[in-house]
Amino acid sequence: MIAGAGSYAYVLSKNVSADSPTSPAAQEDVSSRYNSIASKFDKEIETTEYWTGITKARKKMIAEASGDVLEVSIGTGRNLDYYDWDFKGFNGKVKSFTAVDKSAEMLEVAHEKFSAMFPGVIGVRWIVQDAAEPIPGPPRNANERSGNKDAKYDTIVQTMGLCSVNDPVALLKNLSDCVKEEEGRILLLEHGRGTWEWINRILDGSAQGHATQWGCWWNRDLEEIVKESGLEVVKMERWHFGTNWKFELKKPKTTTTVKEEVKAVAEDIKKQEEKVVEKVKEKVEKVEEKVEKPAQKKGWW
């Protein structure tokens, strides 16, 4: 515990410079950095993640994933070893898997890892795209890549991803559209602002250098980001001076009242449209009568 905290404090204290912006809107997009560091990424961070307890936290959280699983910002697939798979003789909890990452190079590393684990399994989707954009539904089964368009995911996973996207709130709102209402879960393992001001000063001072090197901004206010997303917090844990976060989130079930209000508004709009259409028809008919009706001749002929 002490060794882990000491290691983490050392990591934070490196490359401290001028303060960096904390708002995602003011932070530079550094996500392209991942394509250039994909091949060496695992080797570079393996030791740091082990000694700071991130590896252990990954294992613990990923074990909770089940059903149709979507992992966004999958990177080099550092979580693949920890899923309870239901593929090729494994009778686990994860029956389908969809992987999304903006970096094609990082995603290819993850793909190679999975192929070595489960050669011949084709029912896994590997998608190169921004996770804030619409994401296809889960594969129908382990032997078919085609997605089930109307289906939602049981579990969505993201580890160390909110730090590297342009608009983390938009990303979470998009994930909310992909997960099952009420019963589905979004699991996040992230790093961001801590509970102590001196830690946050270190984070702010080193954020620009860290972002340039690793493609992520580690001084974001994650609690505020989650709050703005509209997702409901089921459970939240923090450690390492509050800078590491684990969230279990869910999409609140749409209440009957809200549904009824939406339906009523839609019906009212429809009625208004019908009235407008009827009035337009009446005017058109009057105009057509004037055009088609021959002018009456006056006088004697």
Image: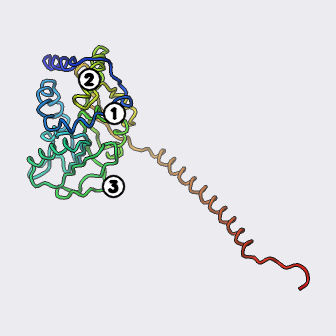
Q: Describe residue 215's horizontal placement relative to residue 79 as left or right.
A: right
Q: Which residue is mark 3?
A: 150
Could you tell me residue 23's position as x and y percent? Answer: 37, 27
Q: In the image, residue 30 lies at what x, y percent?
A: 28, 33
Discs 1/2, front: 2
At 21% from the left and 17% from the top, the residue drawn is 13
Q: Earlier in the sequence, mark 1 or mark 2?
A: 1
Measuring from the top left, give residue 110's x and y in whole percent.
16, 43
Query: Which residue occupies the foreground of this view, 197 or 56?
Result: 197
Q: Quadrant of residue 287?
A: bottom right
How far across and down, in percent of the image, does residue 188 sit?
26, 35
Type of amino acid at the residue the image marks with label 3 = Asp
- Label 2 sits on a secondary structure element that is loop
Identify the residue under disc 1. 233
Residues packed near mark 1 inside 10 Å, few (<14), some (14 to 19) or many (20 plus): some
Question: What SS does tag 3 mark?
Answer: loop
Quarter in which the C terminus is drawn: bottom right
Comes first in the chain, label 3 or label 1? 3
At label 2, counting other C-alpha atoms closer than 10 Å, the crowd grade (few under 14, some 14-19, many 20 or more) is many
Type of amino acid under label 1: Val
Query: Which of the marked residues, 2 or 3, is nearer the chain's N terminus?
Result: 3
Say which element carries label 1.
strand
User: Relative to the observer, which residue lies in front, 103 or 66?
Assistant: 103
Q: CA distance from mark 3 to mark 1?
A: 25 Å
Q: Which residue is mark 2?
A: 243
